[in-house]
């Protein structure tokens, strides 16, 4: 989901939260309470959103879950406050900064594995792995820069090919035309490896690809 879509969704939940607060009444025990059905709907929707955006292990999930157990006004107010905190974090771009850092760590783990394969003489699986890291990073760069990663064909959304992602990123000036040319060459090498054309490239070229992509990721994921 794109950043703008997350911001729009949390704004909808805040609006839903305000409607729940507007149902406040006193119960027979003199407690301020809100409509039970409306509160249950808000709670389910918000927990689903937090789980999708942050994961079930995040503090927002556990905090919201424990802070909104009943249909009391106090629970609805806590729900409202947590949603505003999430909105501020999304609008500030903090969640995407963290996710970007985590993704970068995963990329480098795979590149280290590819380097090990290369050292052991397995240039072909190393080339495929390095190329896959590159393509996934291109998709994440597109998402971070509000560039669509899918195309509609015959009424069905299909993922864009890596070459198209590369072109769109360069066109949007996320990186330079020189980067685009290098990426095109790296993707060609990966495709040769993936299609069994092992004599079309050398171990030295895979090593050059590894070093180039490592430098590229360090630069664009800073």
Image: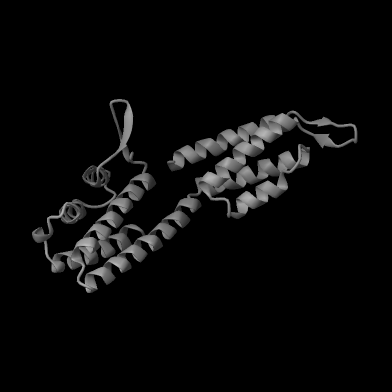
Q: Tell me what residue is drawn at x 24 percent, y 63 percent.
A: 126
On the picture, is 67 further left or further right than 102? right
Q: Tell me what residue is drawn at x 82 percent, y 35 percent.
A: 32
On the picture, is 92 further left or further right than 162? right
Is residue 20 depicted above or below 51 in this figure? above
Residue 119 image position (x, y, % from top left): 23, 73
Q: Tell me what residue is drawn at x 25 percent, y 61 percent.
A: 213
Q: Residue furthest top?
A: 155
How many tags in the picture? Answer: 0
Residue 14 picture quarter: top right
Picture quarter with the C terminus: bottom left
Q: Residue furthest right?
A: 29
Q: Residue furthest front?
A: 196
Residue 131 image position (x, y, % from top left): 25, 56
Picture quarter with the N terminus: top left
Give 213 or 132, whichever is nearer the viewer. Answer: 132
Residue 23 picture quarter: top right
Give 180 or 49, whichever is nearer the viewer. Answer: 49
Q: Residue furthest bottom?
A: 119
Q: Tell me what residue is drawn at x 70 percent, y 34 percent.
A: 39
Residue 113 image position (x, y, % from top left): 31, 67
Give 15 or 211, whichever is nearer the viewer. Answer: 211
Give 172 or 21, whichever is nearer the viewer. Answer: 21
Applied colour scheme: one colour
Residue 164 image position (x, y, % from top left): 23, 42
């Amino acid at each position: 989901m794109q950043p703008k879509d997350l911001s729009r969704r949390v704004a909808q939940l805040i609006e839903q939260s305000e409607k729940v607060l507007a149902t406040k009444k006193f119960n027979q025990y003199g407690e301020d309470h809100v409509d039970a059905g409306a509160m249950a709907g808000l709670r389910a929707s918000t927990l689903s959103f937090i789980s999708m955006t942050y994961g079930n292990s995040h503090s927002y999930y556990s905090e919201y879950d424990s802070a909104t157990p009943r249909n009391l006004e106090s629970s609805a107010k806590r729900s409202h406050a947590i949603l505003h905190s999430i909105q501020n974090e999304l609008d500030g771009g903090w969640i995407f900064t963290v996710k970007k850092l985590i993704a970068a760590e995963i990329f480098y783990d795979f590149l280290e594995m590819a380097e090990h394969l290369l050292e052991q003489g397995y240039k072909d699986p190393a080339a495929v792995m390095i190329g896959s890291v590159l393509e996934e990073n291109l998709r994440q760069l597109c998402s971070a820069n509000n560039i669509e990663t899918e195309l509609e064909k015959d009424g069905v959304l299909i993922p864009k090919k890596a070459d198209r992602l590369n072109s769109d990123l360069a066109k949007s000036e996320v990186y330079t035309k020189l980067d685009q040319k290098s990426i095109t060459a790296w993707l060609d090498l990966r495709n040769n490896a993936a299609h069994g054309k092992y004599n079309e490239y050398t171990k030295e070229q895979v090593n050059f690809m590894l070093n180039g992509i490592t430098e590229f990721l360090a630069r664009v994921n800073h």
